Amino acid sequence: MYKYEIILYWSSEDESYIAVAPELSGCMADGETMEEALENIQVIIGEWLETAKLLGRTIPEPKMKFAYTMQE
């Protein structure tokens, strides 16, 4: 499992959950459930990193930023 920040949100337009890894330009995935979107983004992050290595691009170190919000 990669340690990059992931932003997860519901998209009414796409009618699916969207997962974005903002530290990796253009790295995003979707899914019918939150869990599916999170699983899919892990695959896409792996592919993003593999492609960056093949192209000799700089791979950013994960910033390990975490934020939690709880609503009652």
Image (cartoon, rainbow, N blue to C red):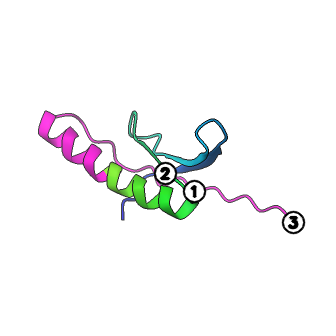
Inspect the image, locate mark 3, and give the three-letter code of the amino acid beneath it. Glu
The image shows a total of numbered marks equal to 3
Q: Is residue 15 left or right of residue 30?
A: right
Report the mark closest to the observer, 1 or 3. 3
What kind of element bears circle 1?
A: loop
The quadrant of the rendering that contains the C terminus is bottom right
Residue 34 image point, x, y percent: 57, 59
The quadrant of the rendering that contains the N terminus is bottom left
Residue 6 image point, x, y percent: 50, 51
Inspect the image, locate mark 2, and give the three-letter code of the amino acid beneath it. Glu
Give the number of the disc on residue 66.
1
Give the number of the disc on residue 5.
2
Dot 2: few (<14), some (14–19), or many (≥20) neighbours within 10 Å? some
Report the mark closest to the observer, 2 or 1. 2
Labels 2 & 1 near each other (Cβ < 8 A): yes
C-alpha distance separating marks 3 and 2: 24 Å
Q: Residues in magenta?
A: 46-72
Instruction: Identify the residue shown where x is 58% and y is 48%.
Output: 16
Instruction: Identify the residue shown where x is 24% and y is 36%.
Output: 58
Report the mark closest to the observer, 3 or 2. 3
Give the quadrant of residue 54.
Answer: top left
Is residue 22 positioned above or below 69 on the image? above
What kind of element bears circle 3?
A: loop
Dot 1: few (<14), some (14–19), or many (≥20) neighbours within 10 Å? few
- Mark 3 sits on what residue? 72
Give the quadrant of residue 69.
Answer: bottom right
Labels 1 & 3 near each other (Cβ < 8 A): no
Mark nearer the N terminus (1 vs 3) = 1
C-alpha distance separating marks 1 and 3: 20 Å
Residue 45 image point, x, y percent: 34, 50
Q: Main secondary structure of the magenta part?
A: loop
Mark nearer the N terminus (3 vs 2) = 2
